[in-house]
Amino acid sequence: MPTPHRPASEALRHVTVVGSGTMGASWTALFLAQGLEVIATDSDPIAEARLRYFIDEAWRALQTLGVSSHGSPEHLTFTSDLARAASRAQYIQECAPAPAKLALIEQLDALAPAEVIIASSAVQAGCSHPERCVVAEPCNPPHLIPLVEVVGGKLTSAETIERAMRFYASIGRKPVHVRKEVPGNVANRLQAALYREMAYLIDQDVLDVRDADAAVCWGPGLRWGVMGPALLCELGAPPGGVHHLLEHLHGPMTALWADLGAPALTPPLRQRIVEGVRSEVGDRSREQLADERDELLIGLLKLRARLSGKPGRAPRARGRRRMTQR
């Protein structure tokens, strides 16, 4: 969650963003709001206009969350010259399309000063300085969602991981150190596990798409926006908390795990999901849906900031009746 009136870092002031698509534009807006000087680079002739439009659209939300006293869209420099962008960087956030990533990282490795971290979703192959390459995987859109998964490759140095973690924390993100590479990244795997069971319940006619969505966002999803599932278990079985839960309910829990579904996304099931989503959407445009999502996210982020000061930490409640989760 961005903190108002605080420079992102005393030492790190210049970030280069390579690629100005959806993710690159979102990172750029965040860096600017946190008071950094940003050089964005992209070879697309319309990239600069598209990027500046995105920043203008995102700036109101960023101001609501809190823009640094040094933050301004005027601190953006755009260039199509990759060498120029890399040579002036103190930190590189690579956001190019997947097919171009590996070759691009090799170029950046050759162009950027050796101490500059290259953060991407692909690392190291063909680099002369593989120790400075790290995976930094955000959730979309990164200017609103604080999570950043930081993953080192086999040759990434511990110093690089520590520096990357410090950098993302300094600009209000919530970095987590993923200690081992896994296909799909952590957040995507957790989402996939939930979506698999949701698809299974729809396939088995337990409920329809609309009610499946409602069961998540009006039930456990509300709790997950405040605390993670592991911490919530501490509240789920008082007075023994998570110890009691795991000690006495591990049998029913593992039995439920064994009963979870593994559906095949057959054409009929895919069509049911598509039709169900279209019914939920109704006459709203994608832009309207995104606006609704962002408005709710901003409200939750502001509330979390007000109550805790930083993501993931909340003040101890006093004098309140203890409530448990089902």
Image (cartoon, helix red, strand yellow):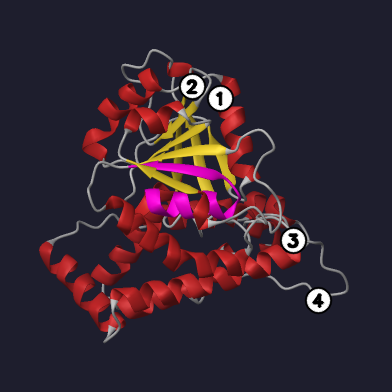
Task: Name which of mark 4 and mark 3 comes first in the sequence.
Answer: 3
Task: Name which of mark 2 and mark 3 comes first in the sequence.
Answer: 2
**Disc 3 residue crowd, few under 14, some 14–19, many 20+, Cα 10 Å:** some
Task: Name which of mark 1 and mark 2 comes first in the sequence.
Answer: 2
Q: Which residue carries the number 4 mark? A: 321
Q: Which residue carries the number 1 mark? A: 160
Give the Cα separation between the discs numbered 3 and 1: 29 Å
- Marks 4 and 1: CB-CB under 8 Å? no
* Pair 4/3: label in front: 3
**Disc 4 residue crowd, few under 14, some 14–19, many 20+, Cα 10 Å:** few
> As drawn, is 30 to the left or to the right of 280?
right
> As drawn, is 190 to the left or to the right of 46?
right
Label annotation for residue 132:
2
**Disc 1 residue crowd, few under 14, some 14–19, many 20+, Cα 10 Å:** many
Q: Quick one: SS at disc 4?
A: loop
* Type of the residue with mark 2: Arg
Give the Cα separation between the discs numbered 4 and 1: 45 Å
Q: Count of labels shown?
A: 4
Q: Quadrant of residue 128?
A: top left
Residue 295: image x %, image y %? 50, 75
* Type of the residue with mark 4: Arg
Q: Which residue carries the number 3 mark? A: 308
Give the Cα separation between the discs numbered 2 and 3: 33 Å
* Pair 4/1: label in front: 1
